[in-house]
Image (cartoon, rainbow, N blue to C red):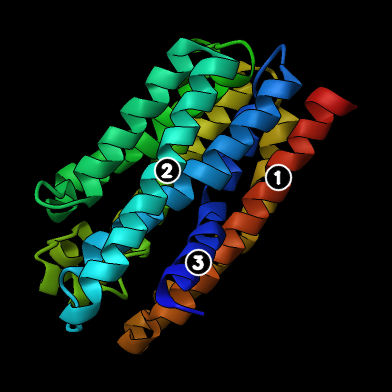
Amino acid sequence: MDKHNHLLKTSFLFSFIYLPLFLFVISQTHDLNWLHTGLFFVILQVLIHPANQLQTANANMIFSDNKSDISKQGKKLISTSMSMNSVAVVLSMLIISLEVGVGVLVYLLLSKLHNNNPIRLRKYAIISILLTMSMQGVLLFVLTQYATGKLMLITNVFAIQACAFFVGFVYPLTQIHTHTDDLKRGDLTISIRLGLKGTFALSLVMFLIAISFMGLHFYNTRNVFHFYLFLFFLSPVAAYFFWWRKNTRLEPLVANYRFTQLFVMINTICMSLFSLLLIYLNHLN
């Protein structure tokens, strides 16, 4: 398998870290259009998120040591990602609505500004985390709800904040094993700025704020039992986080790719199961 196909396969697997947010938004959306829901799932999970990952991989290849492979592989990655993005925008505009198509286009442009050279906002620690929380928490929530059913900003104001801070909880932790590569690329990430101990401290604060906003959301919507379900499904994520935090203090090498991927996997599975249960309770029961 050549590098292009390997990255394409990896990008599809990577896209599933966004699945919990999509499922949670669906669980909180009224008057669902199931056709639009299925289509927007494909647009996000099969087209947009994998394409963005391919573009990020292409941008990172510029800093690799194997310069001879960059031009050929880079053209393939750019061509594939642009084709996927184009299909996503066209499907959104023609089948769902013009507004959703514009929203998808805005999200794609912000993603390019964040990840791609020469602007690459990812290299600015504060701007990067705030933009990521806004894009992947706020914008994706609003866009998904508008595309699939009835947009209810006032009802879901606390849920939107919870999603944004949950992104803020996860995002710094995904950077703790890439300090060397990020410095090589000139990306002074929030994790590099804060160091290992500071990264876990920031994520803990984000985690607690996210839980608080989720509690306010379920109290506001009179679904307190759903908050208890949330805490139940969140408990493995919290247990692993505190175990990981403790062990990185004893042995910093534990902050590596393997343990980061395990954290992402646990979080994705637990939050997806929670959201699927809410979909059943709110829409299928």
Q: Nearer the viewer, residue 201 or 186?
A: 186
Instruction: Determine the image quadrant of residue 62.
Output: bottom left
- Give SS at disc 1: helix
Marks 3 and 1 sit apart, C-alpha to C-alpha, by: 25 Å
Marks 1 and 2 sit apart, C-alpha to C-alpha, by: 33 Å
Marks 2 and 3 sit apart, C-alpha to C-alpha, by: 18 Å
Q: Nearer the viewer, residue 129 or 240?
A: 129
Of marks 3 and 1, which one's residue comes earlier in the chain?
3
| Marking on residue 83 | 2
Going by the numbered disc 1, the residue's amino acid type is Phe
Q: Is residue 272 visible?
A: yes
Q: Residue at x 46, y 47 (%)?
A: 49
Instruction: Determine the image quadrant of residue 218.
Output: top right
- Give SS at disc 3: helix
- Give SS at disc 2: helix
| Marking on residue 261 | none
According to the picture, the residue beneath numbered tag 1 turns out to be: 274
**273 displayed left or right of 132:** right
